[in-house]
Image (cartoon, rainbow, N blue to C red):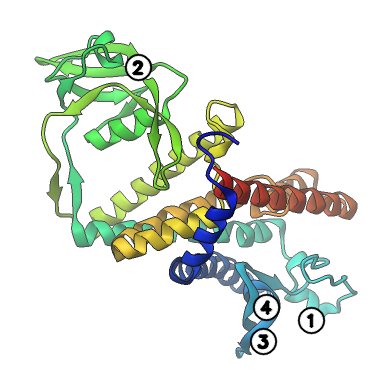
Amino acid sequence: TTNEQRDLGSLIMEFLTTVPVYGFWFLLMLTILVFVHELGHYAIARLCGVRVEVFSIGFGPELFGRNDAHGTRWRFSAIPLGGYVKMFGQGANLLEGESGHALDAAERAVAFDYKSVWRRMAIVAAGPAANFIFAVFIFALIFATHGKDVAVPVIGKVEPGSAAERAGIQAGDRILSLDGSEIQTFDQIVEFVRLNLDEDITIQYERDGVVATTVARPEIYLDKDFLGKDAKVGRLGIRASAAATTVELGAVDSLTEGGKRVFEISGVMLKGIWQIVTGVRSTDEIGGVIRTGYIAGALAQASLWSLVMFSAMLSVNLGLVNLFPVPLLDGGHLVYYTLEAARGRPVGERTQEWGFRIGIAFVLGLMVFAAWNDLVY
């Protein structure tokens, strides 16, 4: 136990007392995001002529549900941490413990496994794609409603002894690009620098009409995240020359900015994950259901728009994580289908079975590890 670790028993009690308040908002947010994800699978499956047997929010025994005109059972299940779409003829459904059986011609026409590999790939990729599209529309709605806060990327002050001062940056300089990425707002500088912990940044700037380039390595310091946990961030030691101003955006510009925002968040998340994998960041920064639930509840208490924005970020996270090449996830299935397209025949059933076992062990292990981090650190 370190000084940063809180008493486990008291933290568990604190969490349990907040469940009625925070749990509602977390489950509502998770239900919406899972519904969007599975709706992506469902919509493209129907478009490709696959019969969908079950659309479930949650796992385990059914709590309630109904059948639609197409024979799909829409249901809520007892364990509300996820969901799935069960498609007819999708091999042995390992989640439900069923085995495959011989299909006649009519059944093969609507069976998942008898569709072309490209259609199967489209169906699988549609889930993460739906999460990205959903996030784009949420950010677009926020931009259309509240506008976009913009602070010009001009340096107002350089901290003495900072990384920026050592690199020769001065007040009045306008930052044009960081590592070749064009910079249009000061917030882009902040986001870029905070995530660069172990590498130099090539900075292109303009001073008195002259464009120049320098290199700086951000200093690493510990900042507090939303829950008061220590998190490593990079810092150049600069401040903006002026406060941000709000720019109103139309529908098209809002959608464009929403797409850019999803792309930026995806890059930040992937880089953060890579830094954890390579040891630049501590694995203590990995959070799970408890941390997510706490943040969702706290944001809901602060403002509904804060919760909506967090939902968009979580939707991007859900889309990215599901594209990881882990057999249990959509990304793992896409790897199998890519191999099938290249080889001209499916990956063997035994290989897929072992992949599923490894995948579920990895996912469950990661969930347990994340929950431990949430409770202890």
The residue located at (30%, 51%) in the rendering is: 256
- The answer to whether 146 is drawn above or below residue 72 in the figure is above
Judge whether residue 26 can be spotted in this image.
no
Q: Which residue is mark 1?
A: 106
Q: Amino acid at mark 3?
A: Gly
| Amino acid bearing label 1 | Ala
Mark 1 residue crowding within 10 angstroms, few (<14) / some (14–19) / many (20+): few
Q: Secondary structure at mark 2?
A: strand
Tell which tag, 2 or 1, sits nearer the viewer: 2
For the residue pair 95 and 165, the one nearer the viewer reads as 165
Crowdedness of circle 3 by 10 Å Cα count: few (<14), some, many (20+)? few
Q: Residue at x 30, y 58 (%)?
A: 140
Q: Badge 2 is on which residue?
A: 202
- Residue 253 in percent (x, y) is at 24, 53
Mark 3, residue position: 71
The amino acid on which the numbered mark 4 sits, given as a three-letter code, is Val
Residue 61 visible, this angle: yes
Q: Position of residue 87 (x, y in %)?
A: 71, 72
